[in-house]
């Protein structure tokens, strides 16, 4: 059979994608997590593979699956494990799209036994996780592209631009939770893309597959 991969726009490109939430253990039966479904990251991985890329998909716990043979899936649980996997695969990647909802804090200690209830109020001491995207931004070579997401509920565009600069990104995808058609569990999303020249593009509410196609087109134009 003829090999058509050579004519696809992302043929020969290695792309790292992250997806889903991270789970930070409190004790053997409990964790701190978030509502990320992984749908956006999996849609991005699928679209990139369709456009000819070899994709490494580092994902937190998710019910999503992919049938694409050009996607190598790496399952992780914690922010620390996601960092390790990203450091391993970013080195040889042409681009990275960081769509995972990484926990910002993790318990300082993990109880070895199930914590028993005692007082009426209870505190868990947390420490900041490593900002994976920021570390990748520091390691980025001039021929690599780094794309991040920003989830904001106020002062959205300025916060997104601040993240673009702080993390040395080439593109940031602003996700608004204020819109009814956008969010963690839904099949639709509404985004605004801001690139390094501060060129801003706002899209309508679309399916996550269509949003993934828009992000992929922008990446192709930047590569
Ligand atoms: N991110 C990351 N590592 C973390 C936290 C976030 O790589 N420990 C990445 C996310 O995957 C996303 C981007 O950073 O691509 C922005 O995440 P977001 O939660 O919007 O911003 P933060 O920098 O964590 O700041 P804050 O939550 O305070 O707004
Ligand atoms: Ca965060």
Image (spheres, rainbow, N blue to C red):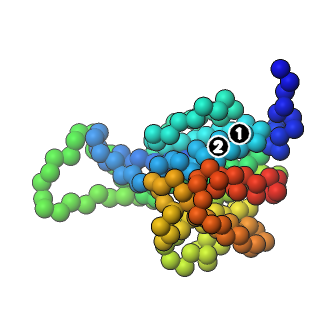
Q: Secondary structure at mark 1?
A: helix
The residue that disc 1 covers is: 49
Q: Position of residue 58 (x, y in %)?
A: 58, 41
- Please name whichever residue, 22 or 200, is drawn nearer the observer in this view of the structure: 200
The residue that disc 2 covers is: 45
Residue found at x 25% / y 60%: 123
> Is residue 170 visible in this depiction of the protein?
yes
Q: Tally the marks.
A: 2
Residue found at x 64% / y 56%: 211
Question: Which image quarter: residue 91?
Answer: top right
Judge left or right: residue 135 versus residue 195.
Answer: left
Q: Position of residue 159 (x, y in %)?
A: 58, 74
Q: Position of residue 31 (x, y in %)?
A: 34, 47
Say which mark, if any, is on residue 214. none
Residue found at x 39% / y 51%: 33
Residue found at x 82% / y 33%: 5
What is the quadrant of the N terminus in the image? Answer: top right
Question: Which image quarter: residue 27?
Answer: top left
Gap in Å between the C-alphas at discs 2 and 1?
6 Å
Question: Which image quarter: residue 28?
Answer: top left
Could you tell me if the residues under marks 2 and 1 are in contact, i.e. CB atoms within 8 Å?
yes
Residue at mark 1: C-beta within 8 A of ligand 1: no
Q: Is residue 22 above or below residue 137?
A: above
């Amino acid at each position: 059979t003829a090999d058509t991969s050579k004519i696809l726009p992302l043929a020969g490109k290695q792309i790292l994608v992250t997806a889903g939430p991270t789970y930070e253990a409190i004790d053997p039966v409990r964790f701190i997590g978030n509502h990320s479904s992984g749908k956006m990251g999996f849609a991005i991985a699928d679209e990139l593979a369709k456009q000819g890329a070899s994709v490494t998909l580092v994902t937190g716990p998710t019910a999503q699956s992919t049938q694409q043979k050009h996607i190598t899936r790496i399952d992780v649980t914690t922010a620390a494990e996601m960092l390790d996997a990203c450091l391993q695969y970013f080195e040889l990647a042409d681009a990275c799209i960081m769509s995972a909802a990484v926990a910002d804090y993790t318990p300082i200690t993990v109880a070895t036994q199930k914590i028993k209830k005692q007082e009426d109020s209870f505190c868990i001491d947390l420490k900041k996780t490593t900002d994976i995207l920021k570390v990748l931004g520091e390691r980025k070579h001039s021929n690599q592209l780094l794309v991040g997401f920003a989830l904001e509920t106020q002062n959205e565009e300025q916060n997104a631009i601040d993240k673009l600069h702080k993390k040395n990104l080439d593109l940031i995808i602003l996700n608004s939770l204020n819109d009814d058609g956008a969010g963690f569990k839904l099949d639709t999303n509404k985004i605004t893309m801001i690139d390094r020249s501060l060129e801003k593009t706002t899209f309508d509410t679309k399916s996550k597959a269509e949003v993934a196609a828009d992000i992929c087109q922008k990446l192709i134009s930047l590569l």
